[in-house]
């Protein structure tokens, strides 16, 4: 098996910075996402995680640095062109078509993709398959604004998957899920990675992050303060002070 040094990153974020007035929201952050891995981006509230997602997807323009997909500089591209290169995302603040059913939310994304990609797949079959995969077949025809928040987040995830991304950015997908749903989400993320997808995960459920992520970046006050495997991140004193808190030795063993 080739080492990760031989693998071209799907996403490379290189020294990106953004300011809002006098506030340095992101400060020379560098992040790499490899195919076949879930990469974590964690940190306290206000650390700059969602702003970093907005930089990656083109909703915010950086004041410095660049974003690359498969080695191609996309820093100047609008969001829809980045999406057509295989990028999809979910949002911290839920973004769904609330008056539509779960099925029709996912169907809309499948139809949008077919409209520009030339894909001949039946969008209805795609939607049904994805709803089953994310565990929503039992609520497929319910309006999304009538669903619990956790299930609505799975609708948003399903809609992102309907675009057939190679790079999937998830902003707190576990929020509102119960323990069993969180377990199923973790299994799904690992399955997606095993199929070759690159996943960048922002999540406050530390147990979920430590379970599914191969590598974790820790962001604090806009700066990356640690990068490493889960055990390395858990054991890092700077991370403990900034975010995780002091951990017992048994927890990092």
Image (tube, helix red, strand yellow):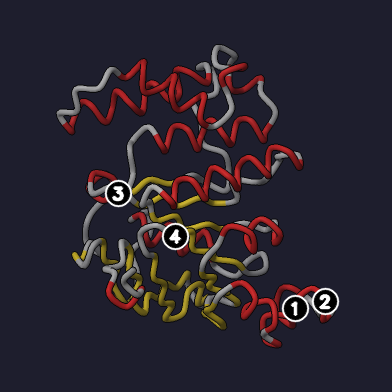
Mark closer to the chain start, 3 or 4: 4
**Residue at position x 53%, y 75% in the image:** 222
As rendered, which of 90 and 126 lies closer to the eye?
Answer: 126
**Residue contact between numbered discs 2 and 1, judged by CB atoms under 8 Å:** yes
Rendering coords of residue 145 (x, y %): 62, 22
Q: Nearer the viewer, residue 24 or 204?
A: 204
Q: Mark 2 highlights which residue?
A: 250
Quadrant housing the N terminus: bottom left
Q: Secondary structure at mark 2?
A: helix
The mark lying in front, picked from 3 and 4, is 4
Whether residues under marks 3 and 4 lie with C-beta atoms below 8 angstroms apart, the answer is: no
Q: Number of labelled discs? A: 4
Q: CA distance from mark 4 to mark 2?
A: 26 Å
Corner quadrant of residue 126: top left
Q: Residue at x 52, y 66 (%)?
A: 214
Q: Position of residue 230 (x, y in %)?
A: 61, 72
User: Element type at marker 1?
Assistant: loop
Report which residue position mark 1 lands on.
253
Q: What residue does disc 4 label?
A: 37
Query: How far apart are the two marked residues, 3 and 2, measured between alpha carbons?
Result: 44 Å
Q: Which of pointers 3 and 1 lies earlier in the amino acid sequence?
A: 3
Disc 4 versus disc 1: distance between alpha carbons?
Answer: 23 Å
Picture quarter with the C terminus: bottom right
Q: Residue at the location (48% across, 18% down)?
A: 103
Q: Is residue 16 above or below residue 78?
A: below
- Residue 79 image label: 3
Q: Secondary structure at mark 4?
A: strand
């Amino acid at each position: 098996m080739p080492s990760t040094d031989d693998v071209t990153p799907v996403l490379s974020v290189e020294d990106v910075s953004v300011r809002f007035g006098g506030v340095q929201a992101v400060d020379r952050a560098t992040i790499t996402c490899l195919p076949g891995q879930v990469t974590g981006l964690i940190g306290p509230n206000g650390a700059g995680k969602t702003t970093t997602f907005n930089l990656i997807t083109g909703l915010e323009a950086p004041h410095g640095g660049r974003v690359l997909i498969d080695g191609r500089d996309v820093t100047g591209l609008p969001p829809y062109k980045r999406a057509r290169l295989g990028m999809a995302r979910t949002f911290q603040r839920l973004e769904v078509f609330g008056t539509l059913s779960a099925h029709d939310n996912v169907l809309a994304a499948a139809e949008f993709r077919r409209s520009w990609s030339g894909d001949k797949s039946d969008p209805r079959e795609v939607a049904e398959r994805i709803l089953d995969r994310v565990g929503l077949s039992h609520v497929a025809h319910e309006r999304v604004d009538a669903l619990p928040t956790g299930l609505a987040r799975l609708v948003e995830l399903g809609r992102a998957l309907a675009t057939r991304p190679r790079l999937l950015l998830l902003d707190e997908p576990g929020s509102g899920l119960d323990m069993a749903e969180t377990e199923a989400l973790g299994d799904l993320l690992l399955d997606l990675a095993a199929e070759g997808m690159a996943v960048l995960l922002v999540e406050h459920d530390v147990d979920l992050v430590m379970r599914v992520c191969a590598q974790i970046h820790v962001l604090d006050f806009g700066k990356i303060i640690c990068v490493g495997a889960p055990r390395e991140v858990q054991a890092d004193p700077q991370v403990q002070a900034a975010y995780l808190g002091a951990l017992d030795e048994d927890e990092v063993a």
